Image: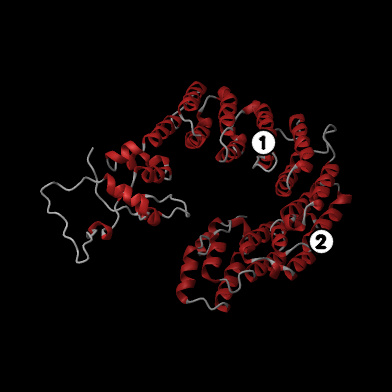
Amino acid sequence: MAQHHFTLRASNLLPSLPMDFDLNAALNDYRAYICALESCPQPAASAPPRQPSASGALINTSASRPTTYQDLPPELIERIGDYVPVQEVSNFSAVDRRTYHTMQSRRLVYRYWQRANQVTSLESINRILEEMDSVLKDPAQHVEPLEALRQRLKALPWDEQSEAFKRVYAAAQRIPKDGVRIQKAMLCMFRELLGLQRAEAFDFAHALAEQRGPGQDNVWRELAIALCSLLTGSPALIERYQVLLARLPSLSVAEQAELILSLSGLLWRFDDRVRTNPSLSTLHAVLRDHALRLPPSCQGDAVGTLAVSAKLLPESERLIRYAQMRDLALSLPDDQWGLALRRLPAGLDMLPPEQRTQELALFERHLARVPEAQRERVAHGLLSSTHYLDKAQSQRVWLQVLSLFNGRGEAALSSLLTGIPPYYLHHQWRFARREVIRFMEANRFSEAARARILDSVPWWQESWLRYEPS
């Protein structure tokens, strides 16, 4: 194998090294350097001996030489290899003969990853998992092949997907850290997998979640998301929804906040017209009680979602519950108010037209409280309401949105405008364009900045009007 002589550059060879890995320090570690020197070939016998210095000591000429890749001990090369993306392992192993041998265990992971990317049957998945269990002793070595198997589940025959899901999901359970991440991703695939066996797979995942200890990262929120794939109002959905609802008191504050948010969104999957369904009023009240028990520092998302889902309640309760949640949102710390406000505009359509104007005025008085990091998402929340507001109300929303970006510069405004879906414009294209120009003038954008922004906005040109939604 031909050797490649080069000085190691972290920015070129190792783009995926973690931020806390100091390659420069590692290269110049004294013990690593001594180890490298000891492994270097000794000078030939014919080489002239070192000349003593005036003090009688030998001059160490190698100490001033820059450390190169060839000076690194195998242990350090192996550590570097752990951070090389799996798809680059083959290229990194080909650097030289020593690297090839040092990367032996990583190349084994690479081969399983390659095979996992080509599986087409439950049998091939079982074979890979059995081999990895016997060969790869470090659980961390299983992560990349399992991630590849997860992505291949959709390629399996329909009748094999449920069992394959269980096998990969259970294998991820044995990985201390990254296994939960893989399981979360698998639960988010429920809508694309499993067919009529989704409820069974849900129960399997739920049973493994119960085995995790308190304080460990878990998948409760993702289990709620997976319920979206079950039939609306079906007994399977109702039973498992209530199981998760009963889980709330035993969870940490952060887990409760996440699960309340997901379960609130699932209220749309119930139907009061089905006699066997639990009352939406009852479910909403239970979630509301749990949200009120959270500390204010965790209530924003849950309160905003419960305010919007009040539109599902009987007409006699709807406005009362919305107002209750909105008033609670106004009392929250600024960062939590911002999280709630990005959701609240979706509830405006349950209000009478004259009350929508009052609600927009209320939002306007509290816009300055929204933290800068949340302003773009709040802006999208406000703009999403324009498709059911009248012309004057829609224009008011546009002015509110632009006010959120006063003094924030070119990048912030460009990010907002390029991310606006066409339906947000709601026949306000000319008004929006005019107000954006006024905004840039008021904020003293340079001509070059204005040109860059206008060139980047897909809906800016007159030709876009041909595709304007009716």
Seen as rendered, the residue at the extreme left is: 46
Check the image and name the residue furthest to the front. Answer: 56
Q: Which mark is residue 212?
A: 1
Q: Nearer the viewer, mark 2 or mark 1?
A: 1
Rendered position, 100 above or below 456: above
The quarter of the picture where the C terminus appears is bottom right
Q: Residue under label 2, please give it.
A: 327
Q: Nearer the viewer, residue 237 or 219?
A: 219
Whole-percent x and y of residue 11? Answer: 37, 55
Counting residues from the N terminus, which is met first, the one under dot 2 or under dot 1? 1
Identified by mark 1, the residue type is Arg
Q: State the image quarter where residue 202 is shown.
A: top right
Q: Report how far apart the C-alphas of labels 2 and 1 lie in the structure.
A: 37 Å
Query: Crowding near pointer 2: few (<14 within 10 Å), some, many (20+)?
Result: few
Does residue 370 show up?
yes
What secondary structure is marked by label 1? loop
Tell me the amino acid under the disc marked 2: Asp
**Which quarter of the rendered picture does the N terminus lie within?**
top left
Residue 427 visible in this rendered orientation of the protein: no
Helix, strand or loop at mark 2? helix
Q: Residue 292, position in %: x, y?
A: 81, 53
Q: Residue at x 65, y 40 (%)?
A: 218
